[in-house]
Amino acid sequence: MKKLAQTQEYLATVAHEIKAPLSAIINLLDVVDKGYVDHKKGMELVGRAKQKAEVVIRMLDDILDYTLLEDKSLMKREKLDIFQVIQESVSIMWPYIEAKKIRLEHDQESCGKRYVSGNYTFLLRVFNNLIMNAIKYNRPGGSIHIHCQPADPERITIKIQDTGIGISPDELESVFQIFVRGKEARKNIDGSIGLGLSLVRKIIEDHNGTIDLESELGRGTTVSVTFPFLLREK
Amino acid sequence: MKKKIMIVDDDLDVLESTKIVLEHSGFDTVTATNVKVAEEILNKEKLDLILLDVMMEKDSDGFNFAQFVKMNERFKHIPIILVTAVNQRTKFKFDAKKDGDFLPVEKFMEKPVEFDDLIATIRGLLK
């Protein structure tokens, strides 16, 4: 009975979170359709409606991934070079990094030839999400620094450090909860559903890893993701 | 003199599209993306109506602000339209006569708001 109530609450919240940006899209297109603005302004509003639609797509992808994680048969594991995964993620995110003129430092030396056992698709998703957050909540012209260090002889920690808006101390733990975003993040209104970090943590924990956040409001955030080594190449 | 409407919503796209429509329909507008700014505007401007999104930073922000307005002698005469996507979540059907004590607003509208309906509702409340 409790699980049913939780499922209903979850679905109702998801429906609301998706309905809000869809309502905004309808409003924007309505303004253009009814001729309230000139052509130039109309094109701007259409562009914004398109961006909002892309946000909805990302929300739905997050939800789908979250539910897929429940199916362990889909979690195929292989030997992965962590550096390669991070590098792939950086390539995917590169247009956003360039657009915001962010300086990215990726310490290849510290991250190279470190192997973990993992699912490539889901681990790529982790780094895409974390690097995207570092970009999204960063200042134009800010920086992101990615480096790796051994947590102990059997584990490796990947740190992603940004010079962004930061998260207040009282919100640090709750940002991992479904649908929660930090107060400062909500000011960067992008309609994101707040599923990202809860999904990230779930994937990491499924890989026997951990994730920690350190943050200072107005100065930036450091995300530390730790995985057990598979083996280390000499 | 044009009637002045404050639009309170944390979604910048909703804010701008609503502002365009209201101004096209002959109203003056001021906008706020959170209740703190809304309160500042309330104290500074002479408002004729408030268009208020229910859920902003916290689920209860819109409700709390509406109550603040209606419990204040200076502002309680200002009609409020509460707008939300949350109606289906709570199965809440607003009835001004029945629920007026709990929800101190004149009208409850569900997102996406049909602009023609919104203008008609505003004109009805401002008569």
Image: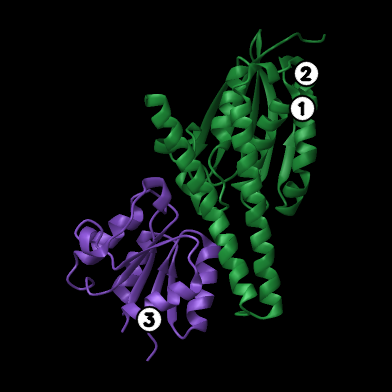
Mark 3: few/some/many CA within 10 Å (<14, 14-19, 20+): few
Q: Is residue B22 left or right of residue A116?
A: left
Disc 1 target residue: A85
Residue B123 numbered mark, or none: 3
List x then y, in percent, for residue B78: 27, 74
Inter-mark Cα distance, 3 to 1:
58 Å
Colour basis: by chain
Residue A162 numbered mark, or none: none
Q: What residue is drawn where x is 67% and y is 44%? A: A143
Inter-mark Cα distance, 1 to 2:
8 Å
Residue lying at the far right of the rendered structure = A234
Disc 2 target residue: A80
> Looking at the image, can residue B40 be seen?
yes
Chain in purple? B
Q: Colour of chain A?
A: green
Quarter placement of the C terminus of chain B: bottom left
Image height of A146 relative to A133, above or below: above
Which chain hosts label 2? A
Q: Secondary structure at mark 2?
A: strand
Q: Amino acid at mark 1?
A: Val
Which chain hosts label 3? B
Q: Secondary structure at mark 1?
A: helix
Looking at this view, is B42 or A72 the one in front?
A72
Label pair 3/1, CB-CB below 8 angstroms: no
